[in-house]
Image (cartoon, rainbow, N blue to C red):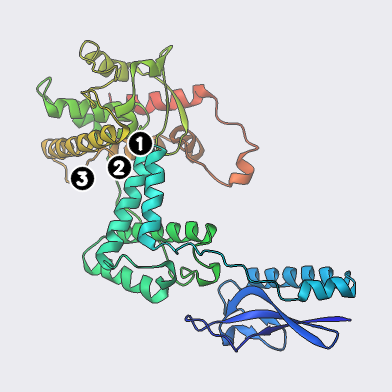
């Protein structure tokens, strides 16, 4: 006869002040212990109900895991004969296995960054580098382990960032990225899932300041008398080209080449999301393209990347520098049209969407044009996308509204 009971083994305590939750198996007047691989604090275990209390952040998940482990163990033992039960429960010979050193947070993330660079995902590598550098400023000791990151650590880190005048959304970004590192470490068995510290940290971005400008300001930018060939003239062309292509991002605009145009349409894949776009070239956009027909470098549609580059990282750094340059001259344009509104390379996308909405187009059409998911993702797969003509017509009307 085999009997199995679940108990919190208070003979052993971890440095996190938790105890192992074990199975005690009784057979032929002998008892054996098997681990459930779950660790709890004393106040998280209900002795009467033999269940994990709701004060544990993962109570539901762990209770399901416990029930499954109990059922699996019970099935295995109840169907076995005495000889097999004794063999199963007998202590196994100890095998000396060389333990791999537990990676620190910084070495773990360094490996992730190296992997991203190998896969040519330079933008993501920069994001990880930015987040880990912020963490190093708070905790310079590179021996930091994932086990050391608890609620108190995260709370102090957040306060540290805000006290250094880091914007709320930047602090949110750093802690959210640290959470991504932690989740990856859990999946790779670097840290125990039971130690997950983010349950009590509220991560919520603040609503960003409005980035759109009114169509009258877009018109005013178009009508500025700027010296042809000057840097500010180029910056306006880049800004308006982004607007006429339904708010294409600056990095995607910079990477457009002549072979992206086929039969009067621009086809490209967005760097950020991988979404494929198919946009009709409006006369206003064609006019800008024609300005550079005899001055192209490396077949790029616009002279944002104006020299040959040898690597993806150098190319993206060049685009980043060009973005700063464009923003500098867009700020100057805002002064010339006498507005206090902030105008950046992001403004074209937000303005396109806002003008589109004010013209009476539905949120669904705007979302389709921008390549966003709208509504319930589950039901969205049953709906047809809008006809390409609808999208073309929408973009044409937005463009006409600023070229009156």
Residue under numbered circle 2: 212
Up-down relation of residue 242 to residue 332 (above or below):
above
Q: From the viewer's side, name the closer residue of 81 and 63.
A: 81
- Of the image marks 2 and 1, the number of the one nearer the N terminus: 2
| Comparing labels 2 and 1, the label whose residue is closer to the camera | 2
- Please, is residue 308 above or below residue 220 in the view? above
Front-most of residues 384 and 355? 384
Q: Is residue 234 above or below residue 352?
A: above
* Circle 3/circle 2 CB separation < 8 Å: no
Residue at 29%, 28% in the rendered image: 254
| Residue 97: % across, % down | 56, 64
Q: Secondary structure at mark 3?
A: loop
- Asked if disc 2 and disc 1 are in contact, CB closer than 8 Å, the reply is yes
Q: Earlier in the sequence, mark 3 or mark 2?
A: 2
Which residue is the site of mark 1?
355
Foreground residue among 98 and 233: 98
Residue on which disc 3 sits: 341
Q: Quadrant of residue 377?
A: top right
Q: Is residue 75 above or below residue 294?
A: below
């Amino acid at each position: 006869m085999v009997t199995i009971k679940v108990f919190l083994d208070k003979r052993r305590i971890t440095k996190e002040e938790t105890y192992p939750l074990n199975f005690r198996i009784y057979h032929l007047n002998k008892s054996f212990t098997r681990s459930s691989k779950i660790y709890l604090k004393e106040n998280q275990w209900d002795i009467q109900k033999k269940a994990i209390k709701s004060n544990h952040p993962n109570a539901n998940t762990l209770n399901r895991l416990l029930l499954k482990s109990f059922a699996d163990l019970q099935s295995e033992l109840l169907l076995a004969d005495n000889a097999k039960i004794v063999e199963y429960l007998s202590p196994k010979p100890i095998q000396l296995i060389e333990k791999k050193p537990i990676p620190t947070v910084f070495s773990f993330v360094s490996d992730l960054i190296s992997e991203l660079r190998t896969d040519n995902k330079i933008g993501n590598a920069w994001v990880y580098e930015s987040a880990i550098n912020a963490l190093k400023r708070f905790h310079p000791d590179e021996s930091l382990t994932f086990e050391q990151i608890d609620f108190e650590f995260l709370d102090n880190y957040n306060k540290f960032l805000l006290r250094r005048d880091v914007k709320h959304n930047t602090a949110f970004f750093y802690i959210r990225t640290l959470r991504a590192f932690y989740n990856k470490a859990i999946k790779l068995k670097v840290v125990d899932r039971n130690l997950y510290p983010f349950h009590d940290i509220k991560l919520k971005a603040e609503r960003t300041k409005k980035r759109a400008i009114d169509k009258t300001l877009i018109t005013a930018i178009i009508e500025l008398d700027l010296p042809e060939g000057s840097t500010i003239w180029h910056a306006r062309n880049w800004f308006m080209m982004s607007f006429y292509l339904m708010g294409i991002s600056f990095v995607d605009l910079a990477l457009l080449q002549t072979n992206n145009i086929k039969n009067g349409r621009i086809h490209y894949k967005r760097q950020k999301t991988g979404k494929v776009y198919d946009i009709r070239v409006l006369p206003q956009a064609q006019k800008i393209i024609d300005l550079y027909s005899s001055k192209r470098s490396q077949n790029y549609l616009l002279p944002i990347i104006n020299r040959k580059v040898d690597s993806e990282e150098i190319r993206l750094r060049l685009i980043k520098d060009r973005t700063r340059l464009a923003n500098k001259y867009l700020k100057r344009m805002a002064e010339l049209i006498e507005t206090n509104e902030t105008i950046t390379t992001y403004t074209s996308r937000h303005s396109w969407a806002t003008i589109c909405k004010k013209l009476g187009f539905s949120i669904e059409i705007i979302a389709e044009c921008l390549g966003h998911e709208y509504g319930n993702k589950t039901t969205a797969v049953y709906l047809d996308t809008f006809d390409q003509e609808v999208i073309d017509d929408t973009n044409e009307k937005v463009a006409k509204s600023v070229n009156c």
